[in-house]
Amino acid sequence: MNQQVEVVVGSIGRAHGIKGDVAIELRTDEPERRFEPGSRLRIEGTRREVTVVEARWHSGRLLVHFAELADRTAVEKARGSVLVVDVDPDELPEEEDEYYDRQLVGLMALRADGSELGRVTQVVHLPAQDLLAIATRSGERLVPFVSELVPSVDLATGTVQLAEVPGLLDDEEAEVVEPSAATDGAGADQ
């Protein structure tokens, strides 16, 4: 059996009403999957678990009722708690051509000509788009993670291919740098 990977899926926000409903500050692109009724989530850094009884959208926010948080007082005490779930590292996103951060971190970034550039060290999530942080000999490069600039992701070979775009990698001398400590990609669940 594969060792599970801890993934952050959200945090407990403000109480909604007096019956224990809570607004979730999402950190996942798959809220319907992670907050499905019956799902068990853990409070980060503890063994305490909460069970999703109901999840619904209200005014653009996900409202969840947890069995263990029966009223507004219980929700307020838990406010700010980070919610995590343990997942199989081989689990894939529901949509084709989507990836979890943990799948991308550590991949070798290749230039358009196939030569090695560096390793993906993290996925930076911004409101407009995500960026791949790539460690090279000459420093970190941030590349927008869009198909026009990253036309190919091959998990089987452990590579991402970058397009030939003038100015994208300013430094011609960039060489491969191995990350000092491999990261597991834990973080936002994509």
Image (cartoon, rainbow, N blue to C red):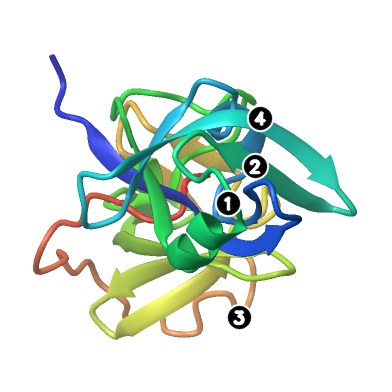
Cβ atoms under marks 2 and 4 closer than 8 Å: yes
Residue 54 numbered tag? 4
Residue 64 numbered tag? 2
Q: Please identify, in this view, whether the residue under mark 1 or under mark 2 is nearer the observer.
A: 2
Q: Earlier in the sequence, mark 3 or mark 1?
A: 1
Q: Residue at x 73, y 57 (%)?
A: 16
Of all residues, the one furthest to the top in this rendering is: 1
Q: Earlier in the sequence, mark 1 or mark 2?
A: 2
Q: Please identify, in this view, whether the residue under mark 3 or under mark 1 is nearer the observer.
A: 1
Residue identified by numbered label 3: 167
Q: Residue at x 54, y 68 (%)?
A: 143
Residue 45 relative to residue 87: left or right: left
> How far from the left and from the top, in percent, is residue 65?
62, 39
**Residue neighbourhood size for the residue with mark 2, other residues' Cα within 10 Å, grouped as few (<14), some (14–19), many (≥20):** many
Residue identified by numbered label 1: 150
Q: Disc 3 marks which amino acid?
A: Gly
Tell me the element at label 3. loop
Front-most of 141 and 172? Answer: 141
Quarter of the figure with residue 49: top left
Cβ atoms under marks 3 and 1 closer than 8 Å: no
Tell me the element at label 1. loop
Q: CA distance from mark 3 to mark 1?
A: 15 Å
